Image (spheres, rainbow, N blue to C red):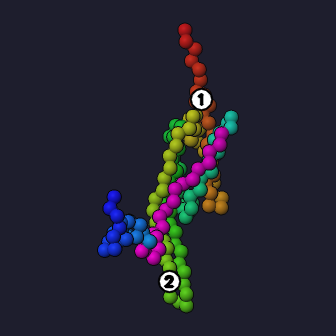
Amino acid sequence: MNALTRLDRFEDLMPEFFRRISRPLAVAEPGDIRLDVTENDKDYQVRAEIPGAKKEDMRVHVDGNFVSISAEVRKDKEEKSGGRVLVRESYYGRVSRGFSLAHEIDDKAVAAKLEDGVLKLTLPKREGSGARAIPIQ
């Protein structure tokens, strides 16, 4: 490791750090889908937070025991002062999340509802699709 001398520029030692802090604002990016999954005897309940997504931009797919959630996410934020735009933060992107469950899902009985920006899924378990012990003869 080299010692810092009076002739060295400090920002040359950590260029990535200084590049990041020299920008006036960091560019915001779409976030991840945050999930809570609970299970009871009959179904799974999924609570998915997808900030910035509208109902018409969300997609849910069920294939056996695999569930995927995707959405187009948009966020626009603008701050004005005296008619001039001082800050504009906006992003657009696609987020997705997939996960496997222990039981196959009855895809014809799945219910999806959007409440206060949170997607709530009810995923009924398909009859006879659970794991079972196989006796050895």
Residue 98 image offset from top left, x and y in percent: 50, 46
Q: Is residue 17 above or below residue 62?
A: below
Q: Is residue 34 magenta?
A: yes
Horizontally, residue 120 falls left or right of residue 20, namely right
Residue drawn at (68%, 38%) of the image: 40
Horizontally, residue 74 falls left or right of residue 3, namely right
Q: Is residue 28 magenta?
A: yes
Residue drawn at (56%, 41%) of the image: 107
Choose top left, top right, bottom left or bottom right for residue 114.
bottom right
Residue drawn at (35%, 67%) of the image: 4
In the picture, the quarter occupied by the C terminus is top right
Horizontally, residue 13 falls left or right of residue 65, namely left
Residue 31 image offset from top left, x and y in percent: 51, 59
Residue 97 image offset from top left, x and y in percent: 50, 50
Extreme residue toward the left, this view:
7
Q: Amino acid at mark 2?
A: Leu
Q: Is residue 77 above or below residue 57?
A: below
Q: Amino acid at mark 1?
A: Gly
Instruction: Give the extent of the magenta segment.
Output: 22-39
Please state which of residues 119 and 25 is positioned toward the viewer in this rendering.
25
In the picture, the quarter occupied by the N terminus is bottom left
Going from N to C along the chain, the mark reached first, 2 or 1, is 2
Please state which of residues 1 and 49 is positioned toward the viewer in this rendering.
1
The answer to whether the residue labelled 2 contacts the one labelled 1, judged by CB atoms less than 8 Å apart, is: no
Q: Is residue 78 visible?
A: yes
Disc marking residue 130: 1
Choose top left, top right, bottom left or bottom right for residue 125.
top right
Q: Is residue 43 above or below residue 84?
A: above
Q: Is residue 112 visible?
A: no
- The mark closer to the camera, 2 or 1, is 2
Q: CA distance from mark 2 to mark 1?
A: 57 Å
Residue bearing mark 2: 86
